[in-house]
Amino acid sequence: MKITLLQIDKTDQSFVEEAVQEFSKRVARYNPFEIITISISKNIRSKSIPEQKNEEEKQILVQLEKYESVFLLDENGKEYSSVEFSQQLQKQLNSGKKSLCFVIGGPYGFTDSLRKKYPLISFSRFTFSHQMIRMLFCEQLYRAFSIIRGEKYHHQ
C-alpha cells in the first residue's frame, strides 16, 4: 500500500523540513511513502478565512480522487496512542486497498464539508501549527511501523 501525506503549502521552517525528510526516509524503509504539497497562491492569503479554506478544499478534493482511504489530521478528530495508531495503520495495510492518504490542511484547518466527508485523526488536544504537525505525523508514522515490526524505537 502506498501511503501519501498531502499538505498545503511548502514547509518554510528549515528545522521542520529536516525532520520531515529524516522521518520520511525512515518510513520509506518499511513502506512506499510520498509527500505531496499543494501550492496555494500568495494572493489567497489576503482573502477571508472561509475563502481560504474553500480554495484549499477545492485543491484538496482534486488530489483525493485517486486514494482509496483518506484521513484528515484535525484537532477535532479521534485521538490515538502510538500503539493504537499502529494498530489502525496495520488494519489499513491489511485491508487490501492500494492507497492511503493523510491530509494536513492549511493554517485554518479544513472546511466543515471536508470534516464530514472523511474520518478525522487528532494528535493531541493541543493545537499545533500546520507545519509542526508534518514533522509529528512523519515521526508517528515511523513509530507505528517500528511498533508493527516489534523494533526497539518505541518504549512502553
Image (cartoon, grey):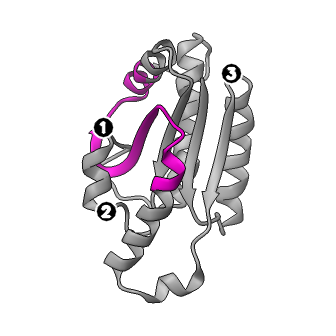
Query: As drawn, is 100 to the left or to the right of 29?
Result: left
Q: Residues within 10 Å of mark 1 (few under 14, many from 20)?
A: some
Mark sitting earlier along the chain (2/3):
3
| Residue at x-position 37% and y-position 62% | 109
Q: Position of residue 19 (x, y in %)?
A: 68, 49
Q: Amino acid at mark 2?
A: Thr
Q: Is residue 154 visible?
A: no
Tell whether position 34 is magenta: no
Front tag of 1 and 3? 3
Q: Position of residue 113 (x, y in %)?
A: 27, 57
* Labels 1 and 3 touching (C-beta < 8 A): no
Q: Position of residue 112 (x, y in %)?
A: 25, 59
Q: Is residue 54 visible?
A: yes
Point out the stretch of residues depicted in magenta: 61-88
Q: Secondary structure at mark 1?
A: strand
Q: Amino acid at mark 3?
A: Tyr
Residue on which the image places disc 3: 30
Residue on which the image places disc 1: 79
Tell whether position 75 is magenta: yes
Query: As drawn, is 131 to the left or to the right of 74?
Result: right
| Residue at x-position 66% and y-position 69% | 12
